[in-house]
Amino acid sequence: MSASKNGKRKGMPRPAQSRAGRRSNHHLEYLNNPKPHPLPFSDAVRVGNLLYLSGQIGADDNLKLAPGGVLAETNRALENISKILRQHGSSLEHVVKCTVMLADMNEWDAMNTVYLRFFPKNRLPARSAFAGTGLALGARVEIECIAAVP
């Protein structure tokens, strides 16, 4: 890359101009669905053709955890993720990365038995998993992901 006489770089595409007058390479969309109990974060943020989903626990719209521990909660969390993806033009088949947070790492095998039912066996997303000292609402598992929008 070289600079021309007027100081501009040659060969570099110009970033798009945002409404606020700042330069931006991608349009951002903050995506939410109405809920009886709004939370202080977006369901997802779309940047170009990627959706970044907030972590989902195994709770319904009224913030009630699925009864039955980590198995039921993992199932509900992934159903929640699937619903959000469909609402915004994607699906579990287009998930490229997941992060799984567990209340207890000893529940990793149990979580995996449910997790593997939701993704095509030949297209498992990249994934990280770790345990923390506690999750929102006393949940056993929280899962966040990044997905492509085809």
Image: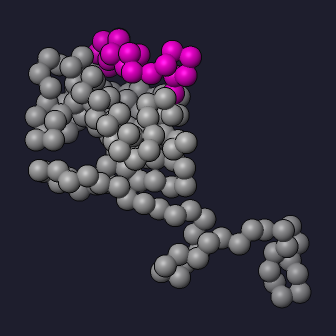
Residue drawn at (75%, 68%), measured in percent from left and top? Answer: 13
Region in magenta: 105-125
- When the figure is inspected, residue 39 is found, relative to residue 60, above or below; the finding is below
Residue 132 makes an appearance in the image: no
> For residue 104, what is the image quadrant?
top left
Give the quarter of the figure containing the C terminus: top right
Residue 7 makes an appearance in the image: yes
Give the quarter of the figure containing the N terminus: bottom right
The front one of 149 and 109 is: 149
Residue, far bottom: 6
> For residue 101, what is the image quadrant?
top left
The front one of 133 and 146 is: 146
Any magenta on residue 45? no
In the displayed structure image, the side of residue 56 where residue 28 appears, left or right: right
The front one of 139 and 22 is: 22
Residue drawn at (55%, 55%), measured in percent from left and top? Answer: 48
> For residue 91, what is the image quadrant?
top left
User: Could you tell me residue 136's position as x and y percent?
Assistant: 20, 39
User: Could you tell me residue 21's position as x and y percent?
Assistant: 53, 82
Residue drawn at (35%, 33%), measured in percent from left and top? Answer: 82
- When the figure is inspected, residue 65 is found, relative to residue 84, above or below; the finding is above
Residue drawn at (23%, 56%), measured in percent from left and top? Answer: 40
Any magenta on residue 112? yes
User: Could you tell me residue 9's position as x and y percent?
Assistant: 81, 75
User: Could you tell me residue 29's position as x and y percent?
Assistant: 42, 60
